[in-house]
Image (tube, rainbow, N blue to C red):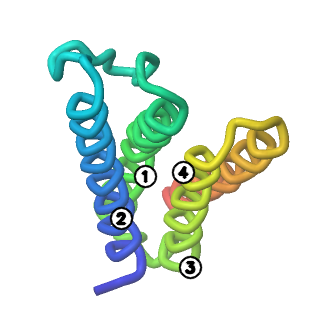
Amino acid sequence: MNTTAVSLIGFACWLVLLSFAVAFFRVYVTATTAKAINSYSPDGSDLPGFGHRLTRARDNCFETLPVFVAIVVAADLLGQMQALHTLAPWVLASRIAQSMTHMISTSPPAIVVRALLLTVQLGIYVYWITALLAGLG
């Protein structure tokens, strides 16, 4: 299996893990408070500190996973998968680091770190898109 496939599967696994964590956190809050299980806001804004940050970290994955998938599919259709292999693990690593930072803190320094980690991901996506388009000419 190539590094791009492993990284894409890793990204999906990370999203599933965060989704389970959100569900378990909501069950915990329901079990320890009077909050009804069917009353949670989808964005986690009604959860205490960590629960809200956890939900937002999970939701941030939804925002960039489709871009990653679209680039991988396009590269495969164009027969250019090798163009992604070197940087794909960096997308996964920066995504996990961004999520972890989000869960730990929303302090200004943590927000700067999260922004830098997102910039790494977006920069890789732009690089890949440019490389794939250049390969068409």
x 56%, y 46%: residue: 103
Secondary structure beneath disc 1? helix
| Residue identifier under label 4 | 99
Cα distance between the residues tagged 4 and 2: 16 Å
> Mark 4: few, some, or many residues within 10 Å (few <14, many ≥20)?
many
Judge by depth and name the residue closer to the eye, 133 or 8.
8
Cα distance between the residues tagged 1 and 3: 14 Å
Q: Are marks 1 and 3 in contact (CB under 8 Å)?
A: no
Q: Which three-letter amino acid code belongs to the residue tagged 3?
A: Thr
Judge by depth and name the residue closer to the eye, 62 or 100.
100
| Residue identifier under label 2 | 8
Q: Which mark is residue 68?
A: 1
> Mark 1: few, some, or many residues within 10 Å (few <14, many ≥20)?
many
N-terminal of the two: label 3 or label 2?
Answer: 2
Nearest to viewer (mark 4 / mark 3): 4
| Residue identifier under label 3 | 86
Quarter occupied by residue 79: bottom left
